[in-house]
Image: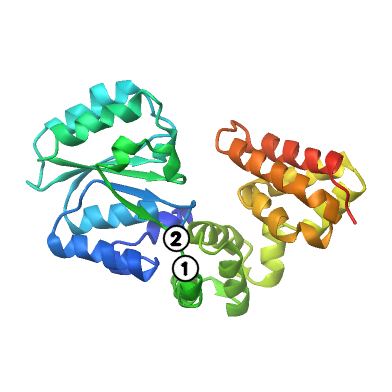
Amino acid sequence: MNKSESLWVEKYRPQTVDDLIVPLKIKSTLQQFVNKGEIPNLILAGKAGVGKTSTILALAKQLDMDVMFINASLENGIDILRTKIAEFSASMSLTGNMKCVILDESDYLSGSAQPGFRAFIEKFSRTTRFVFTCNYSNRIIDPLKSRCTVIDYDFPPEEKKDLLKQMIIRAISILKNENVQFDPKAVAKLVAKHYPDFRRTINELQTISNAGSVSDDTIQAVTGDDYASLINSLKTKNFKEMRQWVAINSDNVTDKIYTYFYENAHKFMAPSSLPQMVITSAEYQFKANFAVDPEINTAAYLTELMANCEFL
Protein backbone atom coordinates (compact mmCIF):
# COMPACT_ATOMS: atom_id res chain seq x y z
CA MET A 1 0.00 0.00 0.00
CA ASN A 2 1.48 3.37 -0.97
CA LYS A 3 1.21 6.57 1.01
CA SER A 4 -1.78 7.95 -0.83
CA GLU A 5 -3.85 4.82 -0.19
CA SER A 6 -3.51 4.74 3.61
CA LEU A 7 -5.50 6.72 6.13
CA TRP A 8 -3.24 9.27 7.79
CA VAL A 9 -5.12 9.08 11.10
CA GLU A 10 -4.12 5.41 11.32
CA LYS A 11 -0.71 5.71 9.71
CA TYR A 12 0.35 8.47 12.10
CA ARG A 13 -1.55 7.31 15.19
CA PRO A 14 0.64 7.81 18.31
CA GLN A 15 2.54 4.66 19.29
CA THR A 16 3.53 5.71 22.81
CA VAL A 17 2.18 7.91 25.59
CA ASP A 18 4.97 10.37 24.88
CA ASP A 19 3.63 10.78 21.31
CA LEU A 20 0.17 11.84 22.51
CA ILE A 21 -0.85 15.49 22.27
CA VAL A 22 -2.92 15.84 25.43
CA PRO A 23 -2.90 18.11 28.49
CA LEU A 24 -0.02 17.68 30.94
CA LYS A 25 -2.20 16.31 33.74
CA ILE A 26 -3.51 13.53 31.52
CA LYS A 27 -0.08 12.69 30.12
CA SER A 28 1.36 12.54 33.64
CA THR A 29 -1.34 10.10 34.74
CA LEU A 30 -0.80 7.92 31.69
CA GLN A 31 2.96 7.90 32.20
CA GLN A 32 2.44 6.66 35.75
CA PHE A 33 0.56 3.66 34.33
CA VAL A 34 3.47 2.95 31.97
CA ASN A 35 5.99 3.25 34.80
CA LYS A 36 4.01 0.80 36.95
CA GLY A 37 3.61 -1.59 34.02
CA GLU A 38 -0.16 -1.91 34.37
CA ILE A 39 -3.38 0.01 33.96
CA PRO A 40 -6.58 0.04 36.02
CA ASN A 41 -10.02 -0.29 34.47
CA LEU A 42 -10.58 3.04 32.75
CA ILE A 43 -13.26 5.41 31.51
CA LEU A 44 -11.85 7.91 29.01
CA ALA A 45 -14.36 10.69 28.44
CA GLY A 46 -14.22 13.67 26.10
CA LYS A 47 -15.15 15.14 22.74
CA ALA A 48 -14.54 13.32 19.48
CA GLY A 49 -11.03 13.39 18.08
CA VAL A 50 -9.15 14.40 21.24
CA GLY A 51 -7.14 11.19 21.55
CA LYS A 52 -9.12 8.79 23.74
CA THR A 53 -8.79 5.75 21.49
CA SER A 54 -5.20 6.62 20.62
CA THR A 55 -4.46 6.77 24.34
CA ILE A 56 -5.54 3.25 25.16
CA LEU A 57 -4.02 1.78 22.00
CA ALA A 58 -0.69 3.42 22.86
CA LEU A 59 -0.89 2.18 26.45
CA ALA A 60 -1.76 -1.36 25.36
CA LYS A 61 1.11 -1.37 22.87
CA GLN A 62 3.65 -0.12 25.40
CA LEU A 63 2.48 -2.66 27.98
CA ASP A 64 2.34 -5.49 25.41
CA MET A 65 -1.30 -6.31 26.12
CA ASP A 66 -3.55 -8.52 24.00
CA VAL A 67 -6.39 -6.28 22.82
CA MET A 68 -10.01 -6.82 21.87
CA PHE A 69 -11.54 -3.72 20.27
CA ILE A 70 -15.31 -3.36 20.13
CA ASN A 71 -17.22 -0.44 18.65
CA ALA A 72 -20.07 -0.23 21.15
CA SER A 73 -22.15 1.95 18.83
CA LEU A 74 -22.44 -1.08 16.53
CA GLU A 75 -22.24 -3.95 19.02
CA ASN A 76 -24.05 -2.90 22.17
CA GLY A 77 -26.19 -5.77 23.37
CA ILE A 78 -25.94 -8.25 26.22
CA ASP A 79 -25.04 -11.02 23.75
CA ILE A 80 -21.59 -9.44 23.35
CA LEU A 81 -20.92 -10.10 27.02
CA ARG A 82 -22.02 -13.71 26.80
CA THR A 83 -19.94 -14.54 23.75
CA LYS A 84 -16.86 -12.77 22.44
CA ILE A 85 -15.89 -10.71 25.52
CA ALA A 86 -16.32 -13.64 27.93
CA GLU A 87 -14.34 -15.97 25.66
CA PHE A 88 -11.54 -13.44 25.20
CA SER A 89 -11.29 -12.64 28.91
CA ALA A 90 -11.30 -16.28 29.95
CA SER A 91 -8.60 -17.41 27.50
CA MET A 92 -4.86 -17.40 28.14
CA SER A 93 -2.91 -14.30 27.11
CA LEU A 94 -0.45 -14.78 24.24
CA THR A 95 2.12 -12.64 26.06
CA GLY A 96 1.42 -13.64 29.64
CA ASN A 97 0.50 -10.02 30.37
CA MET A 98 -2.86 -8.45 31.15
CA LYS A 99 -5.39 -8.39 28.34
CA CYS A 100 -7.45 -5.33 27.43
CA VAL A 101 -11.04 -5.04 26.23
CA ILE A 102 -11.67 -1.64 24.64
CA LEU A 103 -15.29 -0.56 24.45
CA ASP A 104 -15.15 2.38 22.05
CA GLU A 105 -18.13 4.78 22.08
CA SER A 106 -19.38 3.02 25.18
CA ASP A 107 -22.06 5.64 25.82
CA TYR A 108 -24.01 3.62 23.23
CA LEU A 109 -23.98 0.46 25.34
CA SER A 110 -27.50 -0.71 25.99
CA GLY A 111 -29.14 -0.48 29.40
CA SER A 112 -28.94 -4.25 29.77
CA ALA A 113 -25.27 -4.46 28.76
CA GLN A 114 -23.80 -1.85 31.11
CA PRO A 115 -24.80 -3.57 34.38
CA GLY A 116 -23.33 -6.81 33.06
CA PHE A 117 -19.87 -5.31 33.03
CA ARG A 118 -19.86 -4.92 36.81
CA ALA A 119 -19.58 -8.66 37.28
CA PHE A 120 -17.17 -9.08 34.39
CA ILE A 121 -14.76 -6.46 35.75
CA GLU A 122 -14.61 -8.38 39.02
CA LYS A 123 -14.67 -11.89 37.56
CA PHE A 124 -11.75 -11.30 35.21
CA SER A 125 -9.78 -8.86 37.37
CA ARG A 126 -6.71 -11.14 37.34
CA THR A 127 -6.49 -11.38 33.56
CA THR A 128 -8.28 -8.46 31.89
CA ARG A 129 -8.69 -4.71 32.08
CA PHE A 130 -11.74 -2.98 30.65
CA VAL A 131 -11.47 0.46 29.05
CA PHE A 132 -14.58 2.46 28.14
CA THR A 133 -14.24 5.46 25.83
CA CYS A 134 -17.17 7.84 25.57
CA ASN A 135 -18.13 11.36 24.61
CA TYR A 136 -20.42 11.77 27.61
CA SER A 137 -19.47 10.14 30.91
CA ASN A 138 -22.90 10.89 32.36
CA ARG A 139 -24.26 8.10 30.17
CA ILE A 140 -22.12 5.56 32.00
CA ILE A 141 -23.84 4.11 35.05
CA ASP A 142 -22.39 4.90 38.49
CA PRO A 143 -21.61 1.26 39.38
CA LEU A 144 -19.21 1.15 36.40
CA LYS A 145 -17.67 4.51 37.27
CA SER A 146 -16.97 3.32 40.80
CA ARG A 147 -15.00 0.36 39.40
CA CYS A 148 -12.93 2.47 36.99
CA THR A 149 -10.49 5.36 36.98
CA VAL A 150 -12.21 8.18 35.09
CA ILE A 151 -10.05 10.45 32.92
CA ASP A 152 -11.83 13.49 31.50
CA TYR A 153 -10.19 14.93 28.39
CA ASP A 154 -10.58 18.57 29.35
CA PHE A 155 -8.21 20.93 27.55
CA PRO A 156 -7.31 23.79 29.96
CA PRO A 157 -7.30 27.26 28.35
CA GLU A 158 -3.85 27.96 29.80
CA GLU A 159 -2.40 25.01 27.84
CA LYS A 160 -4.06 25.83 24.54
CA LYS A 161 -1.11 27.75 23.08
CA ASP A 162 1.35 24.95 23.75
CA LEU A 163 -1.00 22.19 22.59
CA LEU A 164 -1.79 24.11 19.39
CA LYS A 165 1.94 24.46 18.75
CA GLN A 166 2.42 20.71 19.20
CA MET A 167 -0.46 19.95 16.84
CA ILE A 168 0.83 22.36 14.18
CA ILE A 169 4.32 20.84 14.36
CA ARG A 170 2.86 17.32 14.07
CA ALA A 171 0.64 18.34 11.13
CA ILE A 172 3.56 19.91 9.28
CA SER A 173 5.67 16.81 9.95
CA ILE A 174 2.96 14.64 8.38
CA LEU A 175 2.70 16.86 5.31
CA LYS A 176 6.47 16.84 4.84
CA ASN A 177 6.56 13.07 5.16
CA GLU A 178 3.80 12.79 2.54
CA ASN A 179 5.62 15.23 0.21
CA VAL A 180 2.69 17.66 0.21
CA GLN A 181 3.36 21.36 -0.40
CA PHE A 182 1.80 23.61 2.21
CA ASP A 183 1.48 27.13 3.57
CA PRO A 184 2.38 26.97 7.30
CA LYS A 185 -0.08 29.77 8.11
CA ALA A 186 -2.91 27.88 6.40
CA VAL A 187 -2.04 24.71 8.33
CA ALA A 188 -2.00 26.68 11.60
CA LYS A 189 -5.43 28.15 10.87
CA LEU A 190 -6.89 24.72 10.11
CA VAL A 191 -5.47 23.27 13.33
CA ALA A 192 -6.83 26.21 15.36
CA LYS A 193 -10.20 25.93 13.67
CA HIS A 194 -10.78 22.33 14.79
CA TYR A 195 -8.82 22.37 18.07
CA PRO A 196 -8.78 20.12 20.07
CA ASP A 197 -10.16 17.68 17.46
CA PHE A 198 -6.82 16.78 15.91
CA ARG A 199 -8.24 13.69 14.21
CA ARG A 200 -10.51 15.85 12.11
CA THR A 201 -7.60 18.14 11.25
CA ILE A 202 -5.56 15.21 9.96
CA ASN A 203 -8.51 13.85 7.97
CA GLU A 204 -9.08 17.23 6.34
CA LEU A 205 -5.38 17.66 5.60
CA GLN A 206 -5.38 14.35 3.75
CA THR A 207 -8.49 15.31 1.79
CA ILE A 208 -7.12 18.75 0.96
CA SER A 209 -3.76 17.29 -0.07
CA ASN A 210 -5.49 15.63 -3.03
CA ALA A 211 -5.81 19.13 -4.48
CA GLY A 212 -2.01 19.24 -4.69
CA SER A 213 -1.18 21.54 -1.80
CA VAL A 214 -2.51 22.93 1.47
CA SER A 215 -3.29 26.64 1.27
CA ASP A 216 -6.11 29.01 2.18
CA ASP A 217 -7.56 28.57 -1.32
CA THR A 218 -7.46 24.76 -1.36
CA ILE A 219 -8.84 24.56 2.18
CA GLN A 220 -11.80 26.74 1.26
CA ALA A 221 -12.34 24.91 -2.03
CA VAL A 222 -12.36 21.47 -0.41
CA THR A 223 -14.04 22.06 2.95
CA GLY A 224 -16.43 24.70 1.71
CA ASP A 225 -17.84 25.47 5.17
CA ASP A 226 -18.79 29.05 4.34
CA TYR A 227 -21.22 30.06 7.08
CA ALA A 228 -21.93 33.43 5.50
CA SER A 229 -23.89 31.83 2.67
CA LEU A 230 -25.78 29.65 5.15
CA ILE A 231 -26.76 32.64 7.30
CA ASN A 232 -28.01 34.44 4.19
CA SER A 233 -30.17 31.48 3.18
CA LEU A 234 -31.68 31.33 6.68
CA LYS A 235 -32.28 35.07 6.72
CA THR A 236 -34.06 34.98 3.35
CA LYS A 237 -35.84 31.74 4.30
CA ASN A 238 -34.45 30.03 1.21
CA PHE A 239 -34.93 26.39 2.12
CA LYS A 240 -33.46 25.09 -1.14
CA GLU A 241 -30.18 26.96 -0.68
CA MET A 242 -29.99 25.85 2.94
CA ARG A 243 -30.44 22.20 1.91
CA GLN A 244 -27.75 22.55 -0.74
CA TRP A 245 -25.37 24.01 1.87
CA VAL A 246 -26.05 21.11 4.23
CA ALA A 247 -25.49 18.55 1.47
CA ILE A 248 -22.12 20.09 0.57
CA ASN A 249 -20.93 20.62 4.14
CA SER A 250 -22.48 17.78 6.11
CA ASP A 251 -19.20 15.88 6.42
CA ASN A 252 -17.32 18.96 7.64
CA VAL A 253 -19.59 20.82 10.07
CA THR A 254 -22.21 18.40 11.42
CA ASP A 255 -20.66 18.24 14.88
CA LYS A 256 -19.51 21.87 14.94
CA ILE A 257 -22.57 23.76 13.75
CA TYR A 258 -24.25 23.94 17.16
CA THR A 259 -21.17 25.47 18.74
CA TYR A 260 -20.86 27.88 15.83
CA PHE A 261 -24.38 29.26 16.33
CA TYR A 262 -24.00 29.34 20.12
CA GLU A 263 -20.80 31.40 19.86
CA ASN A 264 -21.67 33.62 16.89
CA ALA A 265 -25.44 34.03 16.64
CA HIS A 266 -25.33 37.38 18.47
CA LYS A 267 -23.60 38.80 15.39
CA PHE A 268 -26.44 38.04 12.96
CA MET A 269 -29.53 37.21 15.05
CA ALA A 270 -31.93 39.49 16.92
CA PRO A 271 -31.30 39.49 20.71
CA SER A 272 -34.86 38.34 21.34
CA SER A 273 -34.16 35.18 19.30
CA LEU A 274 -31.01 34.12 21.14
CA PRO A 275 -32.80 32.18 23.93
CA GLN A 276 -34.73 30.18 21.32
CA MET A 277 -31.48 29.53 19.42
CA VAL A 278 -29.83 28.15 22.58
CA ILE A 279 -32.77 25.84 23.37
CA THR A 280 -32.97 24.59 19.78
CA SER A 281 -29.21 24.05 19.59
CA ALA A 282 -29.17 22.03 22.80
CA GLU A 283 -32.09 19.91 21.61
CA TYR A 284 -30.59 19.04 18.23
CA GLN A 285 -27.08 18.54 19.56
CA PHE A 286 -28.55 15.88 21.85
CA LYS A 287 -30.53 14.32 18.99
CA ALA A 288 -27.40 14.22 16.84
CA ASN A 289 -25.97 11.48 19.05
CA PHE A 290 -28.77 9.13 18.01
CA ALA A 291 -29.57 10.30 14.48
CA VAL A 292 -29.33 7.61 11.80
CA ASP A 293 -28.74 10.29 9.14
CA PRO A 294 -26.85 13.31 10.57
CA GLU A 295 -27.58 15.35 7.45
CA ILE A 296 -31.33 15.15 8.04
CA ASN A 297 -30.87 16.13 11.68
CA THR A 298 -28.75 19.15 10.68
CA ALA A 299 -31.32 20.22 8.07
CA ALA A 300 -34.10 19.92 10.65
CA TYR A 301 -32.10 22.03 13.11
CA LEU A 302 -31.53 24.78 10.56
CA THR A 303 -35.18 24.64 9.48
CA GLU A 304 -36.26 25.35 13.06
CA LEU A 305 -33.86 28.28 13.29
CA MET A 306 -35.15 29.59 9.98
CA ALA A 307 -38.76 29.35 11.14
CA ASN A 308 -38.44 30.54 14.74
CA CYS A 309 -35.55 33.03 14.85
CA GLU A 310 -35.20 36.55 13.53
CA PHE A 311 -32.03 37.29 11.56
CA LEU A 312 -30.53 40.78 11.32
* Residue picked out by circle 1: 156
Q: Residue furthest right?
A: 236
Q: Position of residue 131 (x, y in %)?
A: 29, 44
Dot label at residue 304 = none
* Residue picked out by circle 2: 154
Secondary structure under tag 1 reads loop
Number of residues whose C-alpha sits closer than 10 Å to that of mark 1, classed few (under 14), some (14–19) or many (20 or more): few
Of 79 and 181, which appears nearest the observer? 79
Of 31 and 251, which appears nearest the observer? 31
Question: Identity of the amino acid at label 2?
Answer: Asp
Q: Position of residue 141 (x, y in %)?
A: 37, 35
Residue 16 visible here: no
Tell me if 33 is positioned left or right of 201 in this view. Answer: left
- Classify the position of the C terminus by image quarter: bottom right
Number of residues whose C-alpha sits closer than 10 Å to that of mark 2, classed few (under 14), some (14–19) or many (20 or more): some
Answer above or below: position of 296 versus 18. Answer: above
Q: Position of residue 120 (x, y in %)?
A: 20, 31
Of 226 and 47, which appears nearest the observer? 47
Secondary structure under tag 2 reads loop
Residues under numbered marks 2 and 1 in contact, where contact means CB atoms less than 8 Å apart: yes
Kindly indicate the quadrant of the structure image that contains residue 289: top right
Answer above or below: position of 176 versus 154. Answer: below
Q: Position of residue 177 (x, y in %)?
A: 43, 71
- Residue name at image x 30 percent, y 52 percent: 56
- Residue name at image x 59 percent, y 30 percent: 292
Residue 177 visible here: yes
Q: Using the numbered discs, state the Cα–Cα distance from disc 2 to disc 1 in whole angstroms.
A: 6 Å
- Residue name at image x 89 percent, y 50 percent: 235
Colouring chosen for the image of the structure? rainbow
Answer above or below: position of 92 versus 180. Answer: above
Question: Identity of the amino acid at label 1?
Answer: Pro
